[in-house]
């Protein structure tokens, strides 16, 4: 089973690109987790994905945020949000049971400069997520969390630790929040398989950053031990990010292969 997480930065603007990418890969993606839809549920292009064999669960929002899970295997026990109005006003979480494991697709707040409301909201969102996991799951369950976490966890996850020092996504408070999430019982899958590699998932649009590989790794797959032992490989697919037309997202998809045996 191939599972992908991809911040599309507007599903309506990126629909053709996503479809072309799926075709380029030979339609091998089984589960497609999308973030930053920027569209309400009714404007999500279901027919196009259903035509490829996907069933889509969508939690959309006009102009901002929004997450979706499109899967060829059956989606069970779909859960949109956390069940808390404070944290669910922004559509940032959707989960489902697929086969014998639980999958969460998350779009963590971008945050802001230290001390700003957006900065505090981001840290609070991480605290709530960890608390939610503790109240609803156990680390010994087979579970996978994917999405845009908007944090580069360590210096190797940015193109220049000096240039990006203490900026949004690299501040110590943010990295500590991400470490706390891992500490609940999760492993950073890409870093587990590729401890020394530089594989970024986001590059700004300005100045041709993608061509100089001046990026950050802010999209992740995090697995509990029971699921980690079944993951075969993981990597970033640069093909859709390096398109000039259709206009790409500023993110690239992260794809992992799960042994279903």
Image (tube, helix red, strand yellow):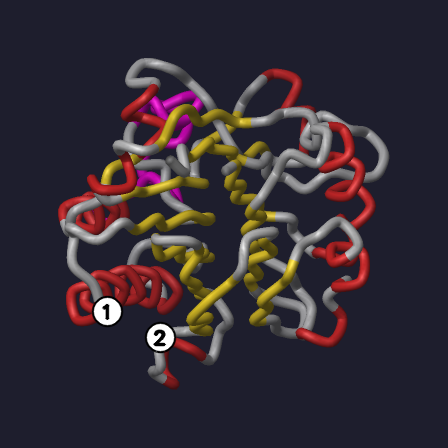
- How far apart are the two marked residues, 1 and 2, measured between alpha carbons? 7 Å
In the depicted view, which residue is nearer to us: 68 or 117? 68
| Residue at left offset 70%, top offset 36% | 27
Q: Which residues are magenta?
A: 155-173
Residue found at the very far bottom of the displayed protein: 85
Callouts 1 and 2 close, C-beta under 8 Å? yes
Who's the residue at 38% across and 15% down the image?
Answer: 197
Q: Position of residue 259 (x, y in %)?
A: 40, 33
Question: What residue is shown with label 1?
Answer: 132
Where is residue 118? Give x, y as percent.
39, 65
Q: Is residue 160 above or below residue 62?
A: above
**Is residue 99 rendered to the left or right of residue 153?**
right
Q: Which residue is mark 2?
A: 82
Q: Point out residue 135 in the picture as x, y percentages from the top left corner.
A: 17, 71
Between residue 239 and residue 177, name the one nearer to us.
239
Q: Residue at x 84, y 38 (%)?
A: 246
């Amino acid at each position: 089973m191939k599972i992908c997480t991809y911040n599309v930065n507007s599903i309506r603007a990126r629909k053709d690109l996503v479809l072309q990418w799926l075709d380029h890969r030979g339609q091998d993606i089984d589960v497609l987790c999308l973030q930053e839809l920027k569209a309400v549920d009714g404007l999500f292009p279901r027919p196009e994905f259903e035509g490829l064999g996907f069933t889509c669960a969508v939690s959309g929002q006009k102009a901002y945020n929004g997450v979706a899970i499109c899967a060829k295997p059956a989606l069970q026990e779909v859960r949109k949000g956390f069940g808390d109005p404070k944290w669910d006003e922004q559509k940032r979480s959707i989960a489902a049971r697929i086969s014998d494991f639980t999958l969460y697709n998350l779009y963590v707040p971008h945050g802001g400069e230290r001390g700003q409301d957006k900065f505090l909201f981001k840290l609070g969102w991480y605290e709530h997520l960890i608390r939610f996991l503790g109240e609803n799951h156990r680390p010994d369950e087979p579970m996978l969390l994917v999405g845009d976490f908007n944090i580069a966890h360590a210096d190797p996850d940015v193109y220049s630790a000096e240039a990006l020092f203490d900026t949004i996504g690299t501040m110590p408070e943010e990295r500590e929040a991400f470490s706390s999430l891992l500490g609940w019982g999760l492993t950073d899958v890409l870093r587990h398989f590729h401890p020394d590699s530089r594989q970024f998932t986001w590059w700004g649009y300005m100045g041709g950053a993608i061509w100089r590989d001046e990026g950050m790794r802010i999209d992740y797959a995090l697995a509990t031990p029971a699921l980690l032992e079944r993951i075969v490989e993981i990597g970033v697919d640069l093909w859709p990010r390096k398109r000039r037309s259709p206009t790409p997202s500023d993110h690239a998809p992260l794809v992992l292969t799960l042994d279903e045996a």
